Image (spheres, rainbow, N blue to C red):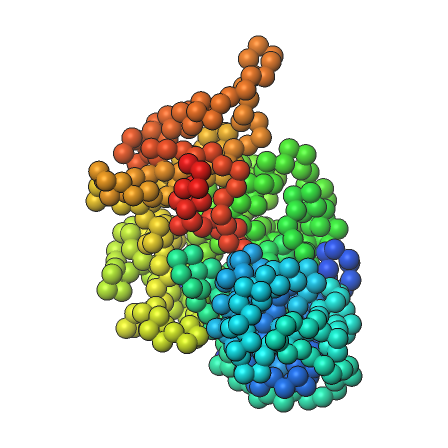
Amino acid sequence: MIEQGKDSTATLRSLIDDLARDRPNDIWLTSADSGVSLTFSDVARFCKLLSSSISACGIACGSSVAIASPNSISSTLAFLATVYGGYRATPLNLVAGSKSISYALNHSGARLLLLADAAAPSIDAALSSDARGLRAQEDGLRIVRMQSDDRPDEWDWGAARKEEGLAVVDSDFSGAENSACQCAIEADTIGLLLYTSGTTGNPKGVLLSHANLIAAGANVALAHRLTREDVGLCVLPIYHINGLCVSVMGTLVSGGGLVMASRFSTQVFWRQISDFSCSWSSLVPTLFSYLLNDEGATRLETNRLRFVRSASAPLAPETQRLFEKRFSIPIIETMGLTETGSQILSNPLSDAERKIGSAGIAYGNEVMIGDEAGRAVGNDVEGEILVRGANVMSGYLNMAKATSDAFTSSGWFRTGDLGRMDSDGYVFVTGRLKELIIKGGENIAPREVDEALLLHTDTLEAAAFARPCAQYGQRVEACVILRESATSVDKNGGELPRSSKELESELLSHCQAILGKFKSPERIHIVSELPKGPSGKVQRLQLLSMLEGGD
């Protein structure tokens, strides 16, 4: 483990106040869409204004304040101000569906919702699907319109939309910025409540303290050697732990700059890197595939770009090699979880030290490979990836047993991921415990099948999964998204269409040549999209139900 010293008593409030005092005129936050920028002094001022306005709504210290918004200056400040004021920021996953959103609103006990206009349709659906549960809340749900993406002082605190049976904010709280924060906070005060994706049941509410959040940002800064001279481009949603802790907390702790994009687009990614002189960005494997598939993509002037990092799902080695060869930019593969404030592992920046195919080594926390009893296994032996450190969550909200089950008796957090560690301390992720395909008593890692499929030139994305089977218990199948050029073949200067059966047969033969027949898929389904969470991670456990409607 590579360590870094940090103030164990710091809070997000003290961090922001210190930056505003020491570097008031340095720019921290810039909108990639509008170009509007805020200094550290601006950030502190808005945090005081918004947290005082939350207090004036009658929200008790430590209570949840829900945030429903795509990326923007306002959504970033909504998170910071909520935590700064001593409340529990609860960003809502806008792509999780109405059931999950309404569950998070109810389970968190949120009495205040900061709502961007762009998120209104998702919230409308959630409120309509579960108005009874929300009306049952003692104080109702107050809704504040985040009417400006760039100016939080223009939010409408006095004319919030009225929902049937729900309370609304009915007072004007402008001018509250000079009020002192009423909530006392400590390093162990909970600052973030973030819900996991919950693919097999209700999502869990992960509780991260001020200390957890700062440690998470410090681990990112340590691994990537971030300084005040660096500028990061955030294209991942900050209602997900990657965008929130890696980009927001990583730049705050390091004192660098942050460019916030409303979303990722292959059409403008390189332009944003160039226009704002960004030195790093965090992506997910799917986005690297999209950039590679964009034949017209050019690097433009990106001389300041030191690296791009990959997280949230394992990156196929072939994708990494092709990207680095084409764009001459190193990819730093990492690994993280919601429960650990994102990053727990990272490859070093040095080309000589990076190991393609590995999620890297531990920075700022301890990582171990353990057996079922939580005991360390030897080098290159597969087991569960365990982690321990200041970034690891305080627990799950109102889930004492789930919290207890998530830790070993010696305090290691069970990630649920399988992997092995080599003699140099590099971890190679081999799969998820819940996603293992067990065929005839033999364990097959879906990632191994994915990587074989991605070696084929026609494959853009791939995801293997298990289907129940009377003979073997489970059998291997896979879903594949093809590149645009894959549906035709050039013969004697002319293009001929290729059928799905032809394409499937070719891919099956390709897999069998690499993996052998036993591990290879029995069926390959050619699809137009894969079910994914907000980070871009494929939800394998949803693939079978997705196909059963028409296959």
- Which quadrant would the N terminus be assigned to in this image? bottom left
Q: Nearer the viewer, residue 367 or 195?
A: 195
Residue 321 location, x and y as percent? 51, 38
Residue at the location (42% across, 36% down)?
551
Q: Residue at x 56, y 16 (%)?
A: 496
- Residue 444 location (% of width, % of height): 30, 43
254 with respect to 357 (left or right) = right
Residue under the point 33% across and 73% down: 401
Asked if residue 531 can be seen in this view, the reply is yes
Whole-percent x and y of residue 411?
A: 33, 72
Q: Is residue 215 above or below residue 550?
A: below
Q: Residue 411: in sight, yes or no?
A: no
Q: Nearer the viewer, residue 400 or 301?
A: 400
Question: Where on the picture, by quarter, is residue 50?
Answer: bottom right
| Left or right relative to 29: residue 425 | left
Total marks in image = 0
Residue 266 locus on image (x, y percent) = 65, 43
Instruction: Say above or below: 547 vs 435.
Output: above
Tell me the residue at 62%/81% (across/down).
85
Residue at far top of view: 492
